[in-house]
Image: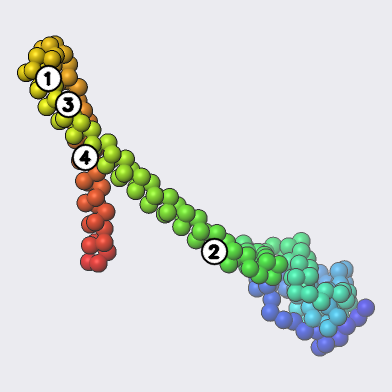
Amino acid sequence: MLVHISDITVKKRIRKDVSGIDELADSIRKYGLLTPIILDDDYVLLAGYRRLQAAKRLGWTSIPATVVDASDKIGRMEIELEENVQRANFTEEELLEGYAALEKLKNPGLLRRIGRKIKNFFAVIFEAGRQSRADKRRKNALLSLTALFGIALAILSGVLHKGGYISYVLLTILNVVSAAAFLYGLFFFIRFTAGSKKKFSQPDREEN
């Protein structure tokens, strides 16, 4: 059907790069308009912006058009994107803008859901890290008690040897064990105190 160009409404366009209008106008002048433009029931342009501009440049007052039922925004945008992707090269920026707008219409809460998922992900990671640090501090505190065991064992073995309850050989073995236990516990005691200093120094840095 033929529609008066003055009756056609062109709303905000996805496509901004409309180069090649002169070439398209020359082609239409020679061969005619092979593909009608697409309008909705209210004669709002859905597809064929370049063809419409070329027709205006040729001085046409009416243009062949196909009227489709695309009352929802999603349908209109899908038609426009599909038609223009096939007939003219979109820039990367235009494609991203168009499909982002389409996705926003299809999933209005998508960005909010993604934002919440990202926020929850980092919250879980932070909580796990904090829990892990607390577990390490408890482990270091418990293992540092081995140093006390080493000291107690050394004292006990000395008393037993003086009382004649154990031989010198057994005393030597117990001394080696007590020394190893003391050094082992001392190592974890140092780690425990270092972790405590780091924990209590963090608020000071934040206040400064």
Label 3 sits on residue: 153
Of 7 and 77, the residue lying toward us? 77
The disc, 1 or 2, on the residue closer to the chain's N-terminal end is 2
Amino acid, disc 1:
Leu
Q: Earlier in the sequence, mark 2 or mark 4?
A: 2
**Spot occupied by residue 183 in the image (x, y as percentages of width and height):** 18, 30
Label 4 CA crowd tier, 10 Å (few <14, some 14–19, many 20+): many
Q: CA distance from mark 4 to mark 1?
A: 28 Å
User: Helix, strand or loop at disc 4?
Assistant: helix
Q: Amino acid at mark 4?
A: Phe
**Cα–Cα span, label 3 and label 4:** 18 Å
Residue 160's tag is 1
Residue extending farthest to the right is 1
Q: CA distance from mark 2 to mark 3?
A: 58 Å
Pointer 4 residue: 189
Earlier in the chain: of badge 1 and badge 3, it is: 3
- Asked whether disc 3 touches disc 4, contact meaning CB atoms under 8 Å apart, the reply is no
The residues bearing labels 2 and 4 have C-alpha atoms spaced at a distance of 42 Å
Residue drawn at x 24%, y 41% is 191
- Residue wearing tag 2: 115
Instruction: First in sequence, mark 4 or 1: give its number.
Output: 1
Residue 46, placed above or below residue 195:
below
Q: Earlier in the sequence, mark 3 or mark 4?
A: 3
184 relative to 11, above or below: above
**In which quadrant of the rendered view does residue 92 lie?**
bottom right
- Viewer-proximal residue among 114 and 157: 157
Q: Amino acid at mark 2?
A: Gly
How far apart in space, not on screen, are marks 1 and 2 (Cα)?
A: 68 Å
Q: Tell me, yes or no, if residue 160 can be seen here.
A: yes
Q: Earlier in the sequence, mark 2 or mark 3?
A: 2
* Front disc: 4 or 1: 1
